Amino acid sequence: MTTTATVGVDSTAPANTLVLFISAAAVVLASHALSVGPWLLRGVLLFGGISGVLAATTPYWLHKSSSRIALATLGVVLAAALLWRIPIQAYAGVTRYQSTIELLVGVSLLRKVSLRAHFDAWLAERAGRVQPPLRASLLCVLSCLLAAPLSVGAVAILCGSLTNVVKSKTTLAVVSMRSMGATMFVLPTTAGAAIVSASLPALERRELLRLGAPLAVAVLLSCSVRRVELSVAPRAPDEGERASLWPLGLFWVLVALLMTVTPLHGATAIALAACATFVVDAAYQRRTREQVRSDVRHALSGVTAELVLLFACGILTGFLACAPLPEGLKAALHHWVATPAAAAGLVLFVLPLFSLFGAHPVVLFSLTFPLLERRVLGGGAREYLVWATMFALAQLVSPTSTSARLAAGSLGLSSRRVSWGTHARFATALASAVWLYVVWV
C-alpha cells in the first residue's frame, strides 16, 4: 500500500466531503448493520455507497496503474460474461474481500496516529543505544510490532528513520522487508495475506499459529544475524519529537482482546482495533471535528486505488469459479497440478516470476486460486502458508511492489536494488523451504 499524496485535499468542496462521508456510512450500514436484512436494500446501499466513495475520490485513484488494471479486468469479465451468457455475482464479488478492505481503511487511519507519535525519532535514538550485535534483532521485533497496525508502512518508517544513521542501506531493506513478510505467516498483516485468509473461511487460528510460527521464527532469525553498523550517532529528539508509544500499545491490547474473546476474522479484528485506537487518540489529543474529518477523508482517499482493484479481483474470482473452461484446459490443469507438490510449486516458483515483471500479485491470485482444486493443497493453514508466501515473495522480488517502492524511496536506492537485487537468493531459499515444509512435513 502506498501513502497517497494529499495535494489538493484541503481544497475539497464541502459538498464533495459530505458525499464521501454519507457514501462510506452507507457501505458500513449495508455490510454490518443490515448484514441479514433485505437483500435489495443491502444491494442499493452497498453499490450506491461504493459509487459515491469512488466518485468523490476520483482524482486519487483514476490515474493509478492498479486502477487501470482493475478497469481492464472488469471489461474483460463483462465481455466474457456476455459472450458465454454467465450471470455475474456482483454483490458476492464486491464483498468477497470485505475484511481486507476494512483492514486497508483501518491501517490508513492508524498511519495518521503514527505520524503524530514520532516513531521515527524514537527508533533512531534506540538504535544508537543498542549494541551492534543486537540492533538487527531489535529492528526485527519493531518491524513485526509495526507491521500489523501499519502493514507495509512499517518498511517506510524503519527505512526512513534510520537511513541517515546506518552505514549499509541495503541492510535496512533486508531487515525491514523480510521481517514484515515474516508476520504474514501467523497474522494477516498485509492486504495480500488478508485476501488469502478471507478466501479460506475454514482457516483456524490455532492451526495457522502452530504451522506458521516456525517459518516466521526462521525468517526473523535469518535477519537477526546481520550486523547493523551506524555511520553517525543519532541525535537526541527535540522536545516536540518525543515519541508517544501508548497508541501502539493500546492497538496491540485491543487486537489481543478481539482475537481471543470474539470470533472476528483476523483482518477485521485488526481493522476494528485500528479504528478504536484512532478514535481514542483523537479524543486524547483533543483534535477538532474538522481535523478528524480531514484525517478520515485522507485515509479513505488514500486507499481507493487498492479498493478498486479488490472489487475487480473479487468479481474476477467469482466469475472464474463458475466459468465453463474448455475441457482441454481443465484436463491440462488437473494433470499439471494433481499433487500438492505440483500445486505448491506452481504457486511458489512460477507465479512470483510474473510479479518480477510487474504482474500484480492480487491479480495472479484471483486468476489462479479459483482454478486449483481445494483438495490438492488441502485447505486450511497449509494452503494459507503457500499463498501467503507467494504474496511475501512478490513483495520482496518485484521492483513494482509497494514494499520495494517504499524502501527505495526512503533509502534513496533504485527499486531494483532493494527488490530482486537484494532478495533474489533469499526468495529462492524461502520458496524452497516452504515447499518442503508444506509438502513433506
Image (tube, helix red, strand yellow):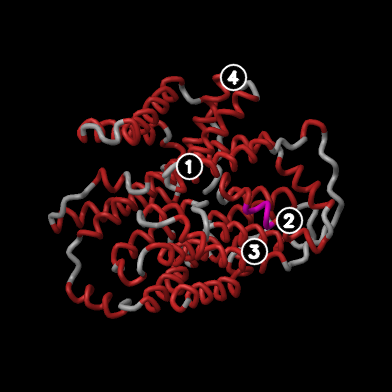
> Which one is closest to the eye, mark 3 or mark 4?
3
Q: Nearer the viewer, residue 256 or 118?
A: 256
Camera-side residue of 204 and 13: 204
Residue wearing tag 1: 261
Magenta segment's dominant SS is helix
Q: Quadrant of residue 404?
A: bottom right
Question: Which of the two discs, 3 and 2, labels the residue nearer the N terminus?
Answer: 2
Percent x, y of residue 422: 64, 68
C-alpha gap between disc 2 and disc 1: 30 Å
Question: Which residues lie in the magenta part?
Answer: 140-144
The residue singled out by tag 4 in the image is: 288
Sequence-first tag of 2 and 1: 2
Q: Amino acid at mark 3?
A: Leu
Q: Position of residue 111 (x, y in %)?
A: 59, 39
Q: Earlier in the sequence, mark 3 or mark 4?
A: 3
Q: Amino acid at mark 4?
A: Thr
